[in-house]
Amino acid sequence: MIEDIARQIREKIPGHHPQTAIILGSGLGSLGDAINNAVHIDYREISGFPQSTVSGHRGKLIIGNLEGAEVICLQGRFHLYEGHPPQVINTVIKTLWELGIRRLIVTNAAGSLTPDFQPGTIMLIKDHINLSGTNPLIGPNNDKYGPRFPDMSNAYTAILREKIKKIAKDINIPLAEGVYMMVTGPNFETAAEIRAFRTLGADAIGMSTVPEVICAAHSGMQVLGLSVLTNMGTGLRQGEQSHAETLAQGEKASAALQKLIKTFLQREKYNG
Ligand code: HPA
């Protein structure tokens, strides 16, 4: 099935050989519009490909050129809270692997668990805590894609983290670094949960990314993860949480995030 999905995509992008995939989070979809010579493929056009539902997440692949690098961009990701079985995310990542993708850039919007990281902060993910209660690799393992018990000690590839930190410094974009925790949602957390998660060692909380990174690490892909912290966690702020705020704050930070990613791709082109 994965091979068939990849074949359908390959047939729609003759001459394209992307090596980097970028998954765009809430309010961060505009990076997709910066891609040159782009081929757009709606998820609906690909038989067997999962379909996304949440507002602010358009469901399409954009294949083309970004700063001299061939990329495939996923505008619209798959969340467990939509009711997708976690294995759906494995299907997506393994499809990318079949297409030749060996590097994954994941972005998301997340809540901050520390006053050190105020809304608007971009946080480089150095590690994660999977509190979703499930795992996208549950089920039979296909050894073609990776081992039964994959290592996660370098899931957020150390050399890519060093590269992006240097870039952030060079182009003067403040970049925090911390641990991302995933819950399924869809509700925002309670104040007690936020206190507990902080104690567990998380700096940011969100409802995505972790399954994607597990699947990518399983297949030996390099991963760069970036969170836009759109709000303080419940109990650390005045007022109520809202998805509208997440989208608005995500859009505000998206220019800086785009600049980071574009500069990263530019430099990768020359440095391999
Ligand atoms: N909690 C969970 N997910 C989120 C948040 C939050 O506060 N903000 C953006 N995504």
Image (cartoon, helix red, strand yellow):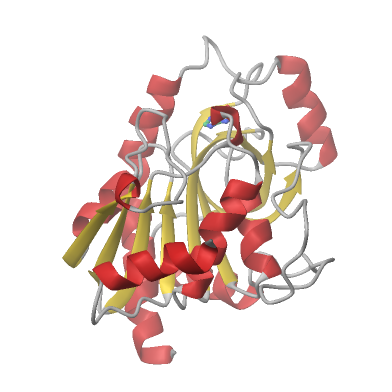
Which residue is pictured at 54% across the width and 29% down the height? 82
Give coordinates of residue 174: x percent, y percent.
46, 54
Instruction: Please give left or right for residue 60 compared with residue 24 in the image.
Output: left
Instruction: Please give left or right for residue 189 compared with residue 88 in the image.
Output: right
Which residue is pictured at 78% across the width and 59% down the height? 140
Residue 133, image quadrant = top right
Ligand 1 shows up in the quarter that is top right
Residue 259, image quadrant = bottom left
State the residue in front, 3 or 178.
3
Which residue is pictured at 42% across the width and 72% down the height? 20
- For the C terminus, give its image quadrant: bottom left
Which residue is pictured at 74% across the width and 74% down the height? 143
> In the figure, 20 relative to 204: above or below?
below
Instruction: Please give left or right for residue 84 compared with residue 67 in the image.
Output: right
Residue 263, image quadrant = bottom left
Question: Is residue 107 in view?
Answer: yes
State the residue in front, 78 or 29.
78
Give coordinates of residue 23: x percent, y percent.
44, 54
Give coordinates of residue 31: x percent, y percent.
28, 54
Q: Residue furthest bottom?
A: 271
> In the figure, 6 relative to 102: above or below?
above
State the residue in front, 261 or 16.
16
Question: Is residue 171 in view?
Answer: no
Q: Residue furthest top?
A: 239
